[in-house]
Image (tube, coloured by chain):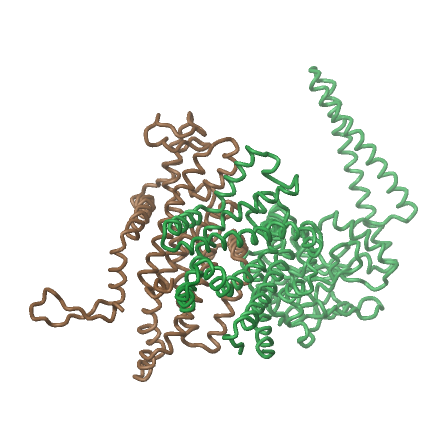
Amino acid sequence: MLKFILRRTFQSLITVMGVMALTFLLFNIVSGDVSSSFLGQHATTQDRLAFKAEHHLDLPVLANIHSRLQIEDCSANKTLQLVDQKGGANVMNALGLYWAIDRTKPVAQKFYHSQWVSLLGEDTHVTEMLVEGVEMVDKPVAPKPEAKEEAKAEGDAEKDAEKNPAPEKTPEAKAEGDAEKKPVLPAEPVLEFRLCRKDLMPAEQAVLDKEYGKTEREKLEKAIESAKAEHAETQKKFKAAKKPEVQDALTSILAKQTAELAKQDKEHKEMVAKIEAGTYQATPLTTKVIFAIDMSTCKTAGDVLAAINANSANHGRLKATIPSRSISQVFTGTQFYWHLRQCVTFSGVSWDSKKKLSTLIVQRGPYSLALTIPGLALGWFSAMIISCFVAYYRGKLVDKLGVFLSVLGMCIPLLAYMIAGQYLMFHIRPDMAYGLKHSYNVYIPIFIGMVAGLGGSVRFYRTVILNEVNQDYVRTARAKGLPLPAILFKHVLKNCMLPIITNLIMILPFLIMGNLLLEKFFGIPGLGGLMIDSIQKRDLPIINTLTFLTAVIYTVGLLLTDILYAVFDPRIRLK
Amino acid sequence: MAETEIQLNPNADSGELTPGRSLWADALRRLTRDKVAMIFFAIVMVYVLIALVPLVASWCGFNLVDWWDAARNGDFRDHGPTLQNGIEGILGYDVFGRSVLGKTILGANTSMSVGFMANIIAVPLGMLLGAIAGYYGGKVDDFIVWVYTTFACVPGIILLIAIKFAFKGVTILGVDFGGMPGLYLALAVTSWIGTCRLVRAETMRLRELDYVQAARCCGRGRFMILLKHIAPNVMHIGIINFSLGFVGAIQSEVMLSFLDIGVPAGTPSWGNMISAADKDLIAGHWWQLASAVGAMFLVVLAWNIFGDRLRDALDPKLKNAG
C-alpha cells in the first residue's frame, strides 16, 4: 500500500511537471514574444526589454549552456570590476554586466538576449546592454537625449555613494528596434564603448563641461534667435489679419511663443551664470567613443574577446575573458526554471493588477465555489433521483420519455440555455439577470448550469444503474420476492455508488476553477473569469499558477480515488 | 455470436458452405436494419450535403459567402421572419440586412468542417498512440500515459482556450494557425485523449488473446501484428469516437465563438450567430438565436442518436451489458 502510494506520488510529480512544461510550451514558446503581446504592439523597445528583464524572460529557454564572457574593468586605479557571473548567461550578458531596470533601484542584475545570436555564432546568446561607465551603443542609433539626462541625474546621485563604476547598459542596441524610431536597421552592427562622465577624471570633466557648455550655449542662443524670428513673423501676421477668428487663433499662438521665449531666456541666463562661475555640467552623458568594434567581423565569442582586448584604443581599460563554463547556471539560469519556481513557490504576482495570486484566490475563489458546489450537488442529486426513477420504469413509457428528453437536453448547447435564461430573467426580474447585486443572484446560473447538465448525467447514471440491474444478485433478490423499489434503492444504488463517486471525485478539482462560461456570462467575479481574462491578456503568472494548482489537486484526486477504490471495494488490491 | 455462424447459401443448389459474413458486414447489416439509425443518418447526410455546397461552389470559382454577404437587403435590417422576399426572408435578417437562412446554411459548412477536421486529426492520433502504448507496453506505455494524463490534468475548456490563444498570429509553414487551422488543431489536441485511453485498454486486452499469441509464435513482426491483427479489432472504437467527437467539436466551436476566439469574425457560423444573439435577444431579435440553435440541435441530436446506434451495431457486447 505504502509502496503504491509512493510510486503514484512520484508519477503525479512527473505529471505535474508535464503540465508545467505544457503551459510553458504554449504560452512562452508557441505564442511568440510575451512582452510584446502583454504590453501591446506599440510598446517601446526599452519598455519591452525592461519588462523581459524584470520577469526573467530574457534568459535562455531551456538550457543555459552558452559560453560566458567576462569583462573586467581595469579603469583608473580602481579595483577590478568583475562581471557578475550569477545572472550572466552569455557573451552579451557578460558584456552587459548589470542592467538597471528601474533607475530608482541601485542595480538589478538582469539580462536579455536577442537576434544578436545570429551575429555572434551559434555558441553564444547575446544581450543588449549598457554598462554604466562603459556604454555600448548600436552605432547607427543616436542615443535618446531624455534617457541620457535621466541617466545623468541618476549617475550623479550614485557617484557619491559608489566610487566603483557601476555597469549599466543601453537598450538601444536591440537589433530589432522600433520601426518608427529606427527606420534603418544597422547592416553592420558596431559596438561602441563610450566613456561616461562618471569615469572622467576631474580635469577631463572640466574640459568636457567647458567644451560642451560652449556648444550648448551656442545651440540655445540659436534656438532663441529662431524663436524670436518666428515670434516676430506671427506678430506681423496678426497685424495683417482682418478676421476676428484668425486673430483669436493667432493670439493664442503668440501667447505660447512669448511664454516659450521667456523660458528660453531664463534658461540662457542661468546657463551663462553657471558657465561663468565654472559650475556648469554639460548635458551629454558620454563624450567620446573609446573604441568601437565592428561586430560583423566577429563570428564567435572569441572574436568579440579578441576585438575588445586587442583594440588599440582600449589601453587595457577593459579586459575580456571567457571563464570556464559554469554548470550551476545550466538549469537555474533559464526561463523554464523561473517558470517552475514561480508556480511551486506560489509567488506569482499578476502583471496586470499587480496583486498576489494568493490574494486573488482568496478573493475570487469563494464566488467560484458558491457557483459550482451547489450546482454540482443539486445537479447530482436531481440526476440521481430522475435516473433511479427512469431505471425503475425500465422499458416503459416513462423510461423512453426520460431518455428522449435527456437526449434532447444534451443536444441544446449550454450557451443557448444561458442566453435564454438570462432573457427570461430580464423580463421577470431585470436586477437578477446579471451581476451580483443581490447575493441570491447566484442561483440563476446555478439553476441554468444544473438544467444544462441534467440530460447528460441522467443518461450516464441510468446506464450505470441498469448495468447493475442485470447482475445476478438483483435476480436473486427479485426471486426472493423483494419489491423493485427496495432492490433499486437499497441494493443497486449501494453497489453502483463506486463508479458514481469516482466520477464525482474526478470533477471536484475543477470546481475551484468555477464554470468559465457561466461566470463570464453572468458577471460573477470568480476564478474562471479571472482565468479567461488572464489568458486573453497573457498574464502568465496567473495562468501558470492556476493551472499548476488545478493539476496538483487533480493528481491528488486521482490518487485518492484509487485508494478509496481499494478501501471500499475489497476485490481491488493496490499493487 | 453472429460472426461465428456459418450460413448456408440458400441460392446455392449444391448446398456448399459459403464463408460467413465478416465482422464489418455484420455490423453494417445490424445498422442498416435499424430504422431509427437510418433516419438519423439520413439527417446527418443532409447536413453533410448542405455543408458541401459552398465547398463545391468554391471549386467552381464561386464564393458563396461573399455572394451572401453582398446580397444585403438594406430595408430589412434586423427584420424578423417575413414572407415578403420569398424564401430568403423566412428566418429574418441580421443587423446588416443579410439573410439569416443563408447564414444558417453557410454555418453548416463551418460546423461540419470543424467537426470533421478536428476528429480526422484526433481519432487517428489517439488510435495510433493508444495502440502503440497498449501493445508495446513498458517505457513507451509509460510515456504515452504520461502525455495524456498531462493533458487530462488541465480542464478541457481552459486547454482549448489556451491553445487557441497561443496560436494567435502564429504561422507555421504558411498555415495561419490564428484562423481555422488553429481551431481544428486546438479541438483535436483536447479530444484525442478519450480515444487513446480506450484503444490502449482494448489493445492491452487483445495482446494477450490466443490469436495474437499464435501470430507471434508464427514469427510475425510486432509492427505487422499491430497493423494486421490488432488495428482492425480496435477500429470500431475509432469510428464510434469519431461520431461522438463530432458532436463535441460542434459544441466546442460554439463555446469558443462566444468567447471571440473560435471561428474568425465574419465567417458565418452557428457559434458566431449564437454569440451575436447574446446582444440581439435583449432587443427582442430572437430569430438568429432560434435558427442557429435549431440547426445545431437537429444535427447534434442526429449525431448523438446515430452514434449510439452505431456503437450498438459495432460493439454488441456493450448493448448486452446495458
Q: Position of residue A116 (x, y in %)?
A: 61, 61
Q: Is residue A200 left or right of residue B266?
A: right
A506 up-or-down from A216: above or below: below
Q: Is residue A88 left or right of residue B146?
A: right
A343 up-or-down from A574: above or below: above
Q: Position of residue A341 (x, y in %)?
A: 67, 65
A251 up-or-down from A350: above or below: above
Q: Residue at x 54, y 73 (%)?
A: A566
Quadrant in which the N terminus of chain B appears: bottom left
Q: Position of residue A210 (x, y in %)?
A: 85, 50
Q: Residue at x 45, y 38 (%)?
A: B289
Q: Nearer the viewer, residue B209 or A572?
A: A572
Image hue for chain A:
green
Q: Position of residue A231 (x, y in %)?
A: 76, 28
Q: Is residue A520 left or right of residue A245?
A: left
Q: Residue at x 51, y 57 (%)?
A: B156
Instruction: Count all numbered tags in the image, as a single digit.
Output: 0
- Snapshot quadrant of residue A175: bottom right
Q: Which chain gets the brown colouring?
A: B
Q: Do we see residue B175 in this rendering?
A: no
Q: Is residue A434 left or right of residue A388?
A: right
Quadrant in which the C terminus of chain B appears: bottom left
Q: Do we see residue A286 in this rendering?
A: yes
- Snapshot quadrant of residue B230: bottom left
Task: Give the farthest residue toward the front.
Answer: A481
